[in-house]
Image (cartoon, rainbow, N blue to C red):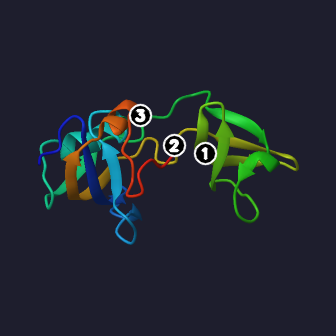
Amino acid sequence: MQATKDSVVSFHYSLYDAQGEQIESSLNGDPSLFLFGHNNVLAGVENAIAGKVAGDKIEVELAPEDAFGVRKEGMQQRVPAKYLKHEGKMKPGQTVRINTEQGMQVGTVVKVGKFNVDVDLNHPLVDQTVRFDIEVMDVRPATEEEITHGHAHGKGGHEH
């Protein structure tokens, strides 16, 4: 089966920065799943997977606007340190997770004060060209429930 709208795609990936350094990989874990055609992955990744079948391998380079975006002004926030999810002492440049009105977001520490932390909520890979090495593991028809919910469900069924 080919990856098309309303199919569930299972894939492994490795993500590299412009210098060829690996940033992350799914190879040591379970493959990632997404419901094709429902904006569940980066558009550039979905476009590269379009029409592919299990076993296909793809390498795709994405410009910033097709990957994690270009820097937006006004994305810095001062946050009480107790609301940030992190390990150890915070320092500028560190990546942290923060609960926002839009859900969990990843930010980069800009400045650390005694009680508050200035965090840039632009994605940590903003303004960067990246490369994905992708291997399609499986493509299957989505269930009605997955289509209704707008995302793929894992092995155990409905996982939110």
- The quarter of the displayed image where residue 28 is located: bottom left
Q: Nearer the viewer, residue 15 or 103?
A: 103
Mark 3 or 1, closer to the camera = 3
Mark 3 and mark 2 lie on one chain; the one further toward the N terminus is: 2
Q: Residue at x 31, y 59 (%)?
A: 13
**Mark 2 touches mark 1? (CB < 8 Å):** no
Q: Is residue 99 left or right of residue 7?
A: right
C-alpha distance separating marks 3 and 1: 27 Å
Badge 2 amino acid: His
- For mark 2, give the secondary structure: loop
Mark 3 and mark 1 lie on one chain; the one further toward the N terminus is: 1
Mark 3 or 2, closer to the camera = 3
Can the viewer see residue 157 in this picture? yes
Can the viewer see residue 18 in this picture? no
C-alpha distance separating marks 2 and 1: 6 Å
On residue 7, the disc is none
**Mark 3 touches mark 2? (CB < 8 Å):** no
Q: Is residue 87 left or right of residue 48?
A: right
| Crowd around label 2: few <14 · some 14–19 · many ≥20 (10 Å) | some
C-alpha distance separating marks 3 and 2: 26 Å
Q: Nearer the viewer, residue 127 or 15?
A: 15
- The quarter of the displayed image where residue 151 is located: top left
Query: As displayed, is residue 100 above or below residue 95?
Result: above
Q: Is residue 40 left or right of residue 101?
A: left
- For mark 1, give the secondary structure: strand
| Crowd around label 3: few <14 · some 14–19 · many ≥20 (10 Å) | few
Residue 146 at what x, y percent from top left?
A: 35, 39
Q: Which residue is mark 3?
A: 149
On residue 123, the disc is 2
Q: Which residue is mark 1?
A: 107
